[in-house]
Amino acid sequence: MLSFLKKDVMVLIRDRTELLVLLLMPIILTVILGFALKGMFAGGFSSFDMKVAVVDHNDRQAGIEQFTEEVKQLSVPEEAKDRLIEAAESSEPSALMMNMLEGDELGQVLETEKVNENKAIEALENGKVTALLKIPENFTYLSLKKMLLDEGKSAELEMVEGKDSSLMAGIFYDTVERFVRTFNFETAIAQAADGTDVTRKSSEGNQEDLGGVITVTDQEPISSIEYYSIGMAVMFAMFVASTIASKAYVENYQNVFARILLSGKHPLLFLSGKAISTTVLVFIQLVLLFGMGRLVLQAFADNSWRFWLGMLVIGAVFSLCIGGLGALLTAITVKSESNVVPGIFAGGIVTVLAMLGGSFFPVSGMPALFTTLGNWTPNGIMLNMTLQWAQGLGMSYILPLIFRLLLLTVVLIAVSLLIFSKRRAA
Amino acid sequence: MLSSFFYTLKEINQTVSKMALKGEYAVLETTNLKKMFKKNVAVSDVNLYLDKGESVGLLGPNGAGKSTAISMISSLVKPTAGDVTWHGKSVVKDPNVIRMYLGVVPQDIALYKELTAVENLRFFGRIYGLKGKALESQMANVLEIVGLTERKNELVKHYSGGMQRRINIAVALLHEPEIIIMDEPTVGIDPQSRNYILEMVQKLNQEKGMTVLYTSHYMEEVERLCDRIYIMDHGKVIASGTKQELTSILSSEETIWIELDRSYPDLAAELNEMEGVLRVTETDNGIKLITPKNSRLLGSIFQAAERQQVQITSLNVQVPTLEDVFLHLTGRKLRD
Ligand SMILES: Nc1ncnc2c1ncn2[C@@H]1O[C@H](COP(=O)(O)OP(=O)(O)O)[C@@H](O)[C@H]1O
Ligand SMILES: [Mg+2]
């Protein structure tokens, strides 16, 4: 098997033009697109505008007054009473939260709208808002009491997420939760999806949707150079698959394939050799391109080993998927005994896939069908995954995408096996 | 037509009697091998055998079905009917019975042209299970045989046609096969390379005792290399035997070449009328006569030339070649 890999790598390395296309082109395009479309990413790029409906049943003033009254009854020194009341007024939780949601950082991607409950639910149902945040009655009073006096039951913030926006809603949830934690409100948040209460975990399964780029995390926003480093890398990875298939075509028509069969090697060894070669080559390509992006273009400033380890894992899974693609193209090529399919793939399909997957421009603003298709392209999944990872979203966000990629790999390999084994029957 | 029928029969008899007499199997044998591509019959009822250490030729024009027959023998193509056996075991049922013992030199160069000779050898050696020192020494060995040791590190695509052919052969020899099947290994190369390859095959056969099945449409090559020859046409074996046996088909005839300074249709016409002349063919610079053996017509030919005032530049009485045999059997030339 190793000799197959070595041979494939050597054959590719000898092909200077192909090598330049696979390694130099993406860098050049990254630079070109990165600078040309910088404007699109000005001030940090966000692929979505999240609208959140806020249903506020809480009366701040009344809450503070009620709390103040209670503090006055306490048998503590006057000085302490004054400090508590002061704290209640300065860090009234719902005001702080709204400030955060509407503030500089989040305000760019998040639009909040105070509406009444019926309207909010309607907006959620027809997809006009991503999530609904309900501030319950007595929120101010209850959370101040819990926070400052550690008394009573905590107030519950209720969040309802829309059907097709679980990732964004998830991020919103995380943001609110982090806020709550930071301010030590000890406020329980009950999250509900589609109106029914669910735990955080159970909604993870459908979080993978869309993604795009999110700037609501701790990380710096994605720059245009970073965006295209990833976009071009995932696009040009697909060219590796078609290149490998074209080489397989040459092997078939120059009879080396026959010669390999004559040695008694099972034909599937040839096919799996192609899958592995593609995988390894794509992986090397990604390492080189991202390495280039990091060192020359100053992309991906995060230097933590955790970040790069994650990148390696993501990259490995993606390479495996493109390996499956390589096997599929090889199977079709060898079976049809023509170079047409890899040609069409490299000459057209890659571009379409790259477009759908967001390699040329972020696709989150596109029609639903467009983004849904994009979310099932290996490059689209990889792009989203990498962007999310680069934004500092945790493993729990990208895990579903990894599984989707693996599923795609299995399908690709199964189909190529099916096609390839038909050939032997002929 | 009759004679071709006769020789097919004779051949079957040979095969049958051989097994009956010796009570053992030929190294390689095909029985009623047939291949159809859709409705076209590429190979039909081919029966041939090779004994250990034999050098056997498969001679036939382009499209005769030689490559198809070889592909079936080497287990790459499944026959439509018939069987191939290696020491009595069916190759069709289990291709692995032959693969390790078989070296195939395909008609087209089956190599990675972007890699060097050494890289090609190493890859193919590995997939044949050779490793380490054994691999390296075998590589050196076959490079020596094909005379490419000095240029082993060049890319195959930079090789001349002849060198590509030679390295194509070298790869087939790597795993030290017992039998080597060569499919037109000298097509389209210069005379020196060709000669080198022919000598090499001869050496492999005579000095190393390798069994050889050699396919060609050049009759000189099979005449020079092969102990026995099968002549194929239109997918069928139309004659087989040693060179002597084959040419003895024509032993009742001889060919007289009359070389002239130009074409003389009148002379050809007169010769055609002459008693004892079987066939007259006009060529660019002369006339070819087929006559019964020992017909003693030379005197009459000179007289006719004198009458027509024709200058004969040379005259040559020729023993029949395989080319003539083919012509005789099919009415066509081997090379069109
Ligand atoms: N794969 C194929 N499909 C269809 N026809 C074929 C195929 N291979 C060979 N043939 C036909 O079979 C005949 C014999 O071809 P081939 O064995 O290559 O002859 P040779 O090697 O003697 O020149 C030819 O008529 C050729 O066109
Ligand atoms: Mg041929």
Image: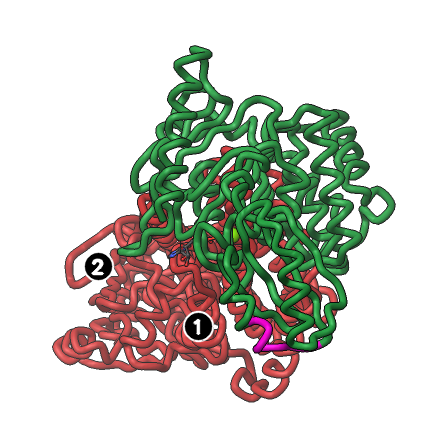
Asked if the stretch drawn in magenta spans residue B263, the answer is: yes
Chain for mark 2?
A
Query: Between marks 1 and 2, how big is the CA–CA gap?
Result: 47 Å
**Is A52 placed above or below A169 here?**
below
From this viewpoint, is residue A75 visible? no
For the record, the magenta segment spans B262-268
The chain letter under disc 1 is: A
Above or below, A251 relative to A179: above
Identified at 57% across, 52% down, the residue is B323
Mark 1 and mark 2 lie on one chain; the one further toward the N terminus is 2
> Residue A244: where, in percent of width, then height?
54, 58
Residue tagged 1:
A344
Front-lying residue, B169 or B271: B271
Q: Position of residue A356 (x, y in %)?
A: 39, 74
Q: Which residue is mark 2?
A: A192
Q: Viewer-proximal residue, B129 or A271? A: B129
Does residue A196 lie above or below A296 as drawn? Answer: above
Q: Which chain is green?
A: B
Residue A238, percent from left and from top = 50, 64
Q: Which residue corresponds to the image point at 14% horizontal and 77% vertical from the top-left?
A: A122
Give, as a three-letter code, the residue at label 2: Ala
Q: Measured from the top left, where is residue B27 in percent x and y?
A: 51, 23
- Quick one: SS at disc 2? strand
Is residue A80 covered in magenta? no
Q: Colour of chain A?
A: red
Q: Is residue B311 left or right of residue A126?
A: right
Nearer the observer: mark 1 or 2; the answer is 1
> Residue A330 sits in which quadrant?
bottom left
In terms of image quadrants, where is residue B202? Answer: top right
Contact between labelled residues 2 and 1, with CB atoms less than 8 Å apart: no
